[in-house]
Amino acid sequence: MGTTKRERQRSNRQSKLQAAQQAVEKAKTRRRILKVVAMVAAALLAAFLYATFAGDDTKTDTGQDSTDTSIAEGSTSPTIALSPTAPGKSITGVTPCPPANGSVDRTTTFAAAAPMCIDATKAYKAVVSTNKGELTIALDPKTAPLAVNNFVVLARYHYYDGVPFHRIVNDFVAQAGDANPKNGRLGTGGPGYTFADELPASPAGYVPGAVAMANSGPNTNGSQFFVFVGPSNPFIANPTYTIFGTVEVGMDNTVPAIMAAGTDDGAVTEAVIIASITISES
């Protein structure tokens, strides 16, 4: 009887040990599964953020500019066929400052950025005429002289004439400014050069009406730009885009008309075209 009792006790101990070992193995398995799930979730989030903010070449080339887009410059396939504007002339040497009255031929390719052509002590405004109405943008040369100079120079060279808004994201941004898409893919091109960032101290400035440069990473600004329609997007957690102006007129009518052609993923459903940009200074 004593021997049988000891055997039962030994059997019970072994059963308890096996049960404990199985519990440990199950816990390890759960941890491994949770780790894999976390890794997959992180990869999916990273892919989402890249696709959302890569801009031009997104962010590609944004390759310039891409968001696609880091808001990048990235590009999104439109739900309609957007035709890139016909290329203009090219400047292969030093880029001269264009005349203030815009009396030059349309030019879309430059070997280098222009010198400082604006007077940062003056006030500059841009009237952006589109097939959906006009936007008046107050430019900010004191805060972003490089970006404002670039925008003014390109506008006076008629770079933006005929260029479409190729990325319109519902309740977020409308992006335009690619006159030289790579292989015909809008959102991947730029003027042929890049220039340095002039970033805000915080992301607090990314609010409805703010106008900022698209890019494909640090110091890759070119020609593409965003109009933020807000609310401020939670994914813009850091100041990564140069803000160079604010929409003063058009937020109540023209911007909603532009955004009506957008989708959640940024594809466009109707052509929104920049007819011209007129610069004034005072």
Image: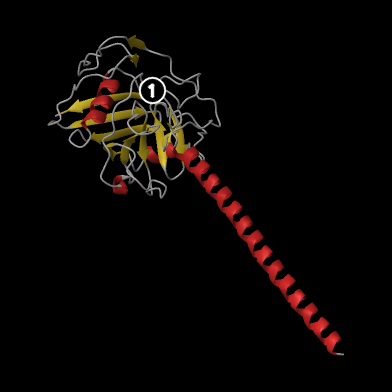
Residue at horizontal 63%, vertical 56%? 33
Q: Which residue is mark 1?
A: 190
Residue found at the very far front of the displayed protein: 3
Q: Badge 1: few (under 14), some or many (20 or more) residues near its Cα, within 10 Å?
A: many
- 205 up-or-down from 3: above or below: above
Is residue 269 shown to the viewer in this render?
Answer: yes
Give x and y (percent) for residue 82.
50, 25
Asked if residue 26 lies left or right of residue 156, the reply is right
Dot 1 falls on a residue whose secondary structure is loop
Residue 249 position within the rendered picture, expressed as x and y whole percent measured from the top left: 28, 38
Give the left or right position of residue 246, taking residue 66 as reference: left
Q: Residue at position x 27%, y 25% from top? A: 150
Q: Is residue 8 shown left or right of residue 37?
A: right
Q: Residue at x 72, y 73 (%)?
A: 17
| Horizontal and vertical percent position of residue 231 | 38, 49
Q: Is residue 37 left or right of residue 152?
A: right
Decide which of 51, 148 is in the foreground and name it: 51
Residue 5 vertical position relative to residue 245 in the rendered view, above or below: below
Q: Nearer the viewer, residue 220 or 245?
A: 220
Q: How is the image coloured?
A: secondary structure
Amino acid type, callout 1 = Gly
Quadrant that contains the N terminus: bottom right
In the displayed structure, 18 sits above or below 233; it is: below
Quadrant for the C terminus, please. top left
Q: Position of residue 181 (x, y in %)?
A: 45, 21
